[in-house]
Image (cartoon, rainbow, N blue to C red):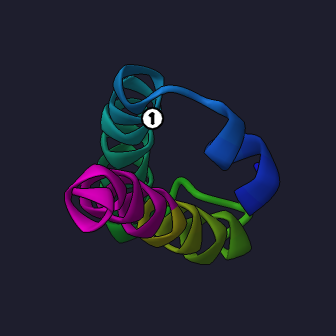
Amino acid sequence: MTSKEIRDLTSEEITTKLRENRANLLDKRIRRQTGQVEKTHEIRALRKEVARMETILRQKAKAPAAAA
């Protein structure tokens, strides 16, 4: 998911997707430890997507405060 697509979502939608991605990341980390993950590059991509969502969510939260 690109940053433009994330910016188009509402804060609630971002929070929901963030929760899903964190759960998916945890699952992949556990599966990597047990040797069941074949595509280890997906873990890095998920970490970056989580960080991107957190950044945009924080920017959206600060935007109304900066306008006031």
Q: Is residue 2 left or right of residue 47?
A: right
Q: Is residue 12 left or right of residue 14?
A: left
Q: Classify the position of the C terminus by image quarter.
A: bottom left
Rendering coords of residue 12 (x, y %): 35, 22
Q: Main secondary structure of the magenta part?
A: helix
Q: Which residues are magenta?
A: 53-68
Q: Classify residue 2 by image quadrant.
A: bottom right
| Identity of the residue drawn at 77% across and 43% down | 5
Q: Is residue 48 left or right of residue 7?
A: left
- Three-letter code, disc 1: Ile
59 relative to 7, above or below: below
Q: Is residue 57 left or right of residue 2?
A: left
Magenta stretch contains residue 55: yes
Choose between 35 and 44: the one closer to the eye: 44
Magenta stretch contains residue 13: no
Rendering coords of residue 36 (x, y %): 53, 53
Helix, strand or loop status at disc 1 = helix
Q: Does residue 62 show up?
A: yes
Rendering coords of residue 56 (x, y %): 47, 60
Question: Badge 1 is on which residue?
Answer: 14
Choose between 59 and 25: the one closer to the eye: 59
Q: Does residue 34 show up?
A: no
| Identity of the residue drawn at 55% across and 68% down | 43
| Identity of the residue drawn at 33% across and 33% down | 15
18 relative to 28, above or below: above
